[in-house]
Amino acid sequence: MNRNKWSGIVNGVESNTQLKANFLMLIVTMLWGSSYLFMKMGLDSFQEFNLVALRFGIAFILAGAVFYKRLIRIDFKMFFYGFILGTILFLVMSVVTIGLKFTTISNAGFLFSLSVVFVPLLVAVLFKIKPERKVVFGVSIAIIGIALLTLNHELTINTGDYLIILGALFYAMQIIVTGKLTKNVDSITLGILQLGVAGAWGLLFSLLFERPHLPSTTESWVSILALSVLCSAIGFIGQAVAQKHTTPTQTGLIFSLEPVFAALFAFIFVSETLPAKGYLGATLILMGVLTAKINFKKPFMRKRFSQTVDGSKV
């Protein structure tokens, strides 16, 4: 078999593997998009910290059962990193869960996607790195989108929308901290530990400020199991598996569909709709997120390089 034919087979296998990984990532994104609906359902039966405790406690048990061999080998450094990330995750989900009491599922999905825009802004502030023009442009579009999506006739934003935006900011911080802490440790083990820490914080706060209880109705069981099994345990494991076989750019673009799935589930299951300006605002937020994420130079440079190699353009 000649080299070109062998190379074609290898490239075909790699392409097929990446396609499967992207499809798995799409499923994970769809599950995460549904989490806003299930959190909203859960808030009918649970107080906020109780919901967080059950969601991440069960997810930790399930993910730990799958990767128990990794957990056996944890050391103090790994536990410390997991404690930091789990604490930030608890802050993120507590703020978002409380915020959902005062805003719509669709608003929550689109506003939380702003974390993608907040990451480069925080990096610029914390590490004195000038943000790229595309990020500044994306932020500008997103701000207009936020105004259209959230401002009422009195030109004020409700408490829930503020909390979701704060949750997006916390999540951007978690993304940055995760990038720093996962360089020399096993990322899957670290991810499982953060689920456990988030669940433990939820249980502690629930014991202090609430009356924690287990699900007692069919709807409450559905919301908790969906959040813990589908959105957290399977979502986390699926992401870990898929990201090994696809690119960060494609991962980011697929994740950008999360608020779209959130709005779709809200429309299908609870008949939630937005006013015309709300849909325009949601579209602008999505455009801002994509603008900040896409590398516009890469495709252009690749095309130009290929034309030069082919001899069609020098």
Image (cartoon, rainbow, N blue to C red):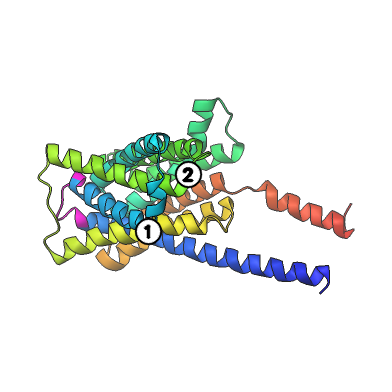
- Which quarter of the rendering shows the N terminus? bottom right
- Between the C-alphas of marks 1 and 2, the distance is 30 Å
The reply to whether discs 1 and 2 touch (Cβ–Cβ < 8 Å) is no
Compared across the picture, whether 83 is left or right of 114 comes to: left
Q: Is residue 227 above or below residue 79?
A: below
Name the residue located 34 percent from the left edge and 42 percent from the top edge: 89
Q: Identify the image quadrant of residue 59.
A: bottom left
Name the residue located 25 percent from the left edge and 64 percent from the top edge: 270
Residue type indicated by callout 1: Val
Name the residue located 40 percent from the left edge and 36 percent from the top edge: 81
Q: Position of residue 244 (x, y in %)?
A: 55, 55
Most foreground residue, 38 or 278: 38
Q: Identify the image quadrant of residue 36.
A: bottom left
Q: Position of residue 312 (x, y in %)?
A: 88, 59
User: What kind of element bears circle 2?
Assistant: helix
Residue type indicated by callout 2: Val
Q: Position of residue 300 (x, y in %)?
A: 72, 51
| Residue extent of the magenta highlight | 42-49
Q: Is residue 47 magenta?
A: yes
Label 2 Cα crowd, 10 Å radius (few <14 / some 14-19 / many 20+): many
Q: Can you name the residue that lies furthest to the bottom here?
A: 1
Q: Position of residue 157 (x, y in %)?
A: 30, 40
User: What kind of element bears circle 1?
Assistant: helix
Q: Which mark is residue 235?
A: none
Which callout, 1 or 2, points at the residue further toward the start of the chain?
A: 1
Compared across the picture, whether 121 is left or right of 51 comes to: right
Q: Is residue 165 magenta?
A: no
Q: Would you say residue 179 is visible in this rendering?
A: yes
Total labels: the figure holds 2
The residue at which mark 1 appears reads as 66
The residue at which mark 2 appears reads as 116
Which of labels 1 and 2 is toward the front? 1
